[in-house]
Every structure is written in C-alpha cells, then in structure tokens.
Image (cartoon, grey):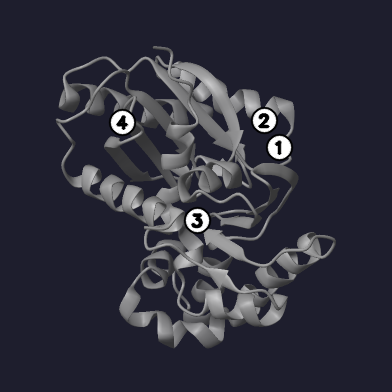
C-alpha cells in the first residue's frame, strides 16, 4: 500500500466516523477544527493517529480565510465539541486549527480565539495545505486546497514546506456563477453545485472559473520543479476540475476520494499529543 493509499484509508475511516464514532481508541484525543467558508468541520483522532469521530456543519462564518462572525463561529464549534463529548463520553481538551497560507497574525489569532472560546486549548495553528499534506503523506509536489473562498498553495520539497500562497477564488465563486446562469438564489445554486448528477451539465458554465484556479496554480508554481499537484478541499471534487488543472498547468493532478475531509483530519493529526 502506498503512502497515498494510506491517506485515502484514513479519510475513508474519518468519513465513517462522521456517521458512527469509533469506540476503539487509545491515549489522548486531539481535535482539529477547520473553519471554512462553506463548512465547519471538527475531527477527532487518538494517540495512534486514528480517526475517532467528527462533525460537519454548513456555515458562513468565514470569508476569504477571515472570521467575519466571531460569535456565531464560536457557538457552532462549541456546539459541535459538546456533541462529540457527549457521544464519546470524554472531555475534549486539546486542539489545533488552521488558516490559509499567508494569513496575517491578527486573523490567525481570531481563528484561535474561536476554538479557545469552545473550551479547547489550542496547541498549534497550521496552514491548510500543510495539514492536507500530512494526511496524504506528501513530501514533494504542490498541495492545492480549493476551499469555499480561497485557493491555498503549498510547495513541498523533501517533506518541508518551501513556499505558500493564497488567493481569493474558490467554491463560493463557482456557486455565484451557477446562481447567475440559472437565476437561482445562492442556496439553490449551492445545492445544484454539489449534486453529482448535475455536474456534467454545469461543466461548461464553470470551466472559466476552473481555468482561473488553474492559472492561479500555474503562476505560483512556475518557479519550482513540480511533477505532481494534489488537489484537496470541497471545490476540488467538481467534475472536470482535475482535468482542467492538468491541461492548463501542464502538470498531472490528483484528487482524493474525500477531498473535503482531508484538511480537517490533517489539522487534528498536527495537534501535538501531550501524553
């Protein structure tokens, strides 16, 4: 089994934990909180780095990586953490959170304060693409996290992040294009966007935004010798995006089976184990 396959297996296990938590866990439980533009995801892992439980809730409390509704964000995370504690029968104490690459210190602190407001001690604040790389075992290449509001890029060499960047284009922009093309509300367009049965129909409409994402990636990796691009984040699941990126950047791209879950799971794994 390759390292990528191991990462895929971890994500499969985390997806299962969203439905039913694991009772077979050891050591300390660590929490990862991913405050996204479209969703808030909380992941719980044990000392053996195995997924234990999780929650996902649609929310619009972050815009372009910046917390814009602190109280609502805190209340959502607090509710999710309390639900997980009741489900697991144990207090959750320690956590990590993440921000897009290049986020200003003040914005990093806002994200941290949201998580601390839910009663968790934040032991690490990491960048989102690096968290994804942790799950997928990526040591070389470009990890591109296409979230709701931004596209974050990390270039890795020999296991170290040597470059990061972030630009404001993501899933929200795809939704707005659909809303305009079909005369729908944002909420209706969002539901249409994530319907797998409609994505082939949507591809011609969304292709220009996909090409913009590809141009962002190409611009930021142009100075590096990149042989593969790893796409994560909810928007990377859109049908056709992987091929557009490969074609326009000239570098092969891959998307894991659960791209929305990769980063939050990686955030939890990057929380130090205090045992």
Residue at 68% from the left image edge and 41% from the top image edge: 160
Q: Which of marks 4 and 2 is nearer the N terminus?
A: 4
Instruction: Locate the N terminus and report the quarter of the image it occupies.
Output: bottom left
Q: What element carries label 4?
A: helix
Q: Position of residue 69 (x, y in %)?
A: 53, 33
Q: Label 1 belongs to which residue?
A: 103
Q: Earlier in the sequence, mark 3 or mark 2?
A: 2
Q: Is mark 3 on a helix, strand or loop?
A: loop
Q: Position of residue 55 (x, y in %)?
A: 30, 39
Q: Earlier in the sequence, mark 4 or mark 3?
A: 4
Q: Label 3 belongs to which residue?
A: 233
Q: Where is residue 214 in the image (x, y as percent from the top left)?
A: 68, 71
Q: Is mark 1 on a helix, strand or loop?
A: loop
- In this orientation, does residue 68 appear? no
Q: Residues within 10 Å of mark 2 (few under 14, many from 20)?
A: some
Mark 3–mark 2 Cα distance, whole angstroms, equals 20 Å
Residue at 70% from the left image edge and 78% from the top image edge: 250
For residue 80, the mark is 4
Q: Is mark 2 on a helix, strand or loop?
A: helix
């Amino acid at each position: 089994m390759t390292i990528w396959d191991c990462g895929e297996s971890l994500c499969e296990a985390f997806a299962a934990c969203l439905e039913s938590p694991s009772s077979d866990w050891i050591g300390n439980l660590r929490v990862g909180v991913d405050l996204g533009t479209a969703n808030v995801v909380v992941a719980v892992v044990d000392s053996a780095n195995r997924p234990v439980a999780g929650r996902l809730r649609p929310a619009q409390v972050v815009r372009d990586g910046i917390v814009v509704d602190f109280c609502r964000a805190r209340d959502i995370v607090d509710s999710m953490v309390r639900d997980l504690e009741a489900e697991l029968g144990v207090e959750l104490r320690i956590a990590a959170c993440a921000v897009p690459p290049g986020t200003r210190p003040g914005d990093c602190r806002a994200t941290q304060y949201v998580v601390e407001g839910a009663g968790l001690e934040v032991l690490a604040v990491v960048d989102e693409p690096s968290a994804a790389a942790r799950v997928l075992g990526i040591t070389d290449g470009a990890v591109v996290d296409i979230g709701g509001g931004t596209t974050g890029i990390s270039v890795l060499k020999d296991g170290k992040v040597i470059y990061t960047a972030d630009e404001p284009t993501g899933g929200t922009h795809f939704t707005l294009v659909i809303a305009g093309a079909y005369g729908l509300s944002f909420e209706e367009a969002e539901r249409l966007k994530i319907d797998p049965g409609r994505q082939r129909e949507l591809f011609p409409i969304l292709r220009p935004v996909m090409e913009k994402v590809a141009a962002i990636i190409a611009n930021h990796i142009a100075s590096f010798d990149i042989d593969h691009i790893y796409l994560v984040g909810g928007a990377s699941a859109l049908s056709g995006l992987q091929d557009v990126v490969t074609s326009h950047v000239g570098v092969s791209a891959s998307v894991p089976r659960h791209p929305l879950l990769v980063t939050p799971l990686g955030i939890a794994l990057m929380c130090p184990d205090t045992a």
